[in-house]
């Protein structure tokens, strides 16, 4: 057909949904989910992916002095 690219826009979302469902099923059955299992990444990896250090830096930089008053 002449197409050079195919997009799978929902593939990552569908995989994430399956991962969430599996993790929740594990928690429901065992009342826990170990970071060391194949079902979850370590919390430090989560923090890296959401760029938590950058968020902390921006909060320090832009937070108002009178916050909460």
Image: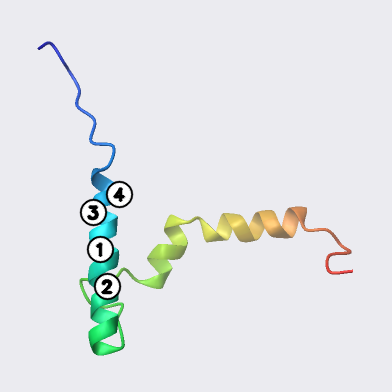
The C terminus, quarter of image:
bottom right
Name the residue furthest bottom. 31
Q: Earlier in the sequence, mark 4 or mark 2?
A: 4
Which numbered tag is attached to residue 19?
1
- Other residues around mark 3 within 10 Å, as few (<14) / some (14–19) / many (≥20): few
Do callouts 3 and 2 mark residues in contact (Cβ within 8 Å)? no
The residue beneath circle 3 is: 15
Q: Quadrant of residue 35?
A: bottom left
Query: Mark 1 packing: few (<14 Cα in 10 Å), some, or many (20+)?
Result: some
Give me the residue at 54% from left, 60% from top: 52
Q: Which residue is drawn at 29% across and 56% down?
A: 16
Whether pointer 3 and pointer 1 mark residues with C-beta atoms closer than 8 Å, the reply is yes
Depth check: 52 or 12 in front?
12
- Residue found at x 31% / y 86%: 32
Where residue 9 appears, as percent x and y from the top left, is 28, 37
**Mark 4 Cα-neighbour bin, 10 Å: few <14, some 14–19, many ≥20:** few
State the residue position of label 2. Answer: 23
- The reply to whether discs 3 and 4 touch (Cβ–Cβ < 8 Å) is yes
Q: Gap between marks 1 and 2, in whole Å?
A: 6 Å
Image height of 41 relative to 15, above or below: below
């Amino acid at each position: 057909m002449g197409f050079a690219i195919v997009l799978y826009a929902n593939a990552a979302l569908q995989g994430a949904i399956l991962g969430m469902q599996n993790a929740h099923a594990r928690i429901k059955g065992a009342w826990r989910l170990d970071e060391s299992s194949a079902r979850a990444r370590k919390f430090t990896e989560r923090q890296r992916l959401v760029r938590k250090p950058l968020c902390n830096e921006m909060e320090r930089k832009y937070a108002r002095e009178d916050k909460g008053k």
